[in-house]
Image (tube, grey):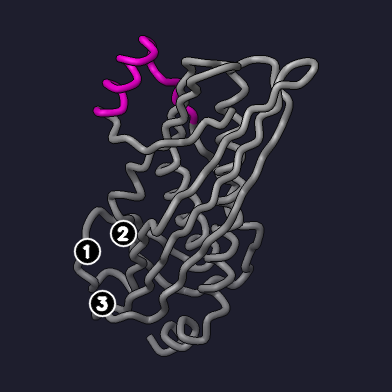
Amino acid sequence: MRAKGVVFSVAMGMLVIGAISGCAPKVIPVVPSGPAINYPEKINATVAVLFDEDLTTYIDRFSITEDFCAGHTYDIMLGNGMVDAVKSALEAVFTNVVVVDTVPEMDKYDALARVTLESVDNDAEITELTFGHKVKVRYDISITVNLLDKNLKLIYPYNASAIGTKSNRVTSCSEVGDIIAESAEKCLNKISTDIAQALYSAKQVQDYFNKK
């Protein structure tokens, strides 16, 4: 049996699942650990970060409709996890990172990072074993970071894509959501590391900040 993650708006999702299962979805946080890299000499700059709303509000809803855990629904808070992953990547590169809600007046900032979500793909497979069940989840996420100068001209565009997988034997439905979240976290940790390495090593980025 395969349970596919589906994205709803929060309001619509609650109505649909409530009508089907009669119970509220279990909310599962996504908490990536950040980039697996540390730069002792960060780029001395203050960078504003503007996340696309589609990214920040993204929720994956996994609804299991048959066999083991039928009727169970998990809301995976992927948007919060993506924000944390990208922000921690930028914090590994620059001395000061500030999240903003709209394009700011650039007199206070050296650059602006605009972050957009390109795609999310996922799959969850539940297999019956002799004792218990095995849950295997895959996440494939693609995020773009466009670094802009004080005049909002493009310095460096970068797209980070990664795949994260997690599988484990489970004996209760409460464990399923955790495995889904861990798969997403693995994917986002790779993306976080990729973004940090790309921005720190890019000649365009180093040249711009060395001249500022």
Question: Looking at this view, is 78 or 168 the one in front?
Answer: 168
Q: Which mark is residue 152?
A: 3
**The C terminus appears in which quarter of the rendering?**
bottom left
Vertical comparison of 121 with 45: above or below: above
Residue 104 spot, x, y in % from top left: 21, 64
* Residue ID for mark 2: 50
Please tell me whether mark 2 sits on a helix, a strand or a loop: strand
Q: Earlier in the sequence, mark 1 or mark 3?
A: 1
Which residue lies at the image location 65% right of the left edge and 44% below the top edge? Answer: 165
Q: Are marks 1 and 3 in contact (CB under 8 Å)?
A: yes
Residue range in magenta is 12-28
**Which residue is at the front of the view, 69 or 89?**
69
Tell me which residue sits at (63%, 28%) in the image: 126
Q: Is residue 51 magenta?
A: no
**Which residue bears the numbered disc 1?**
103
Kind of residue indicated by mark 1 = Val
Badge 3 or badge 2: first in the primary sequence: 2
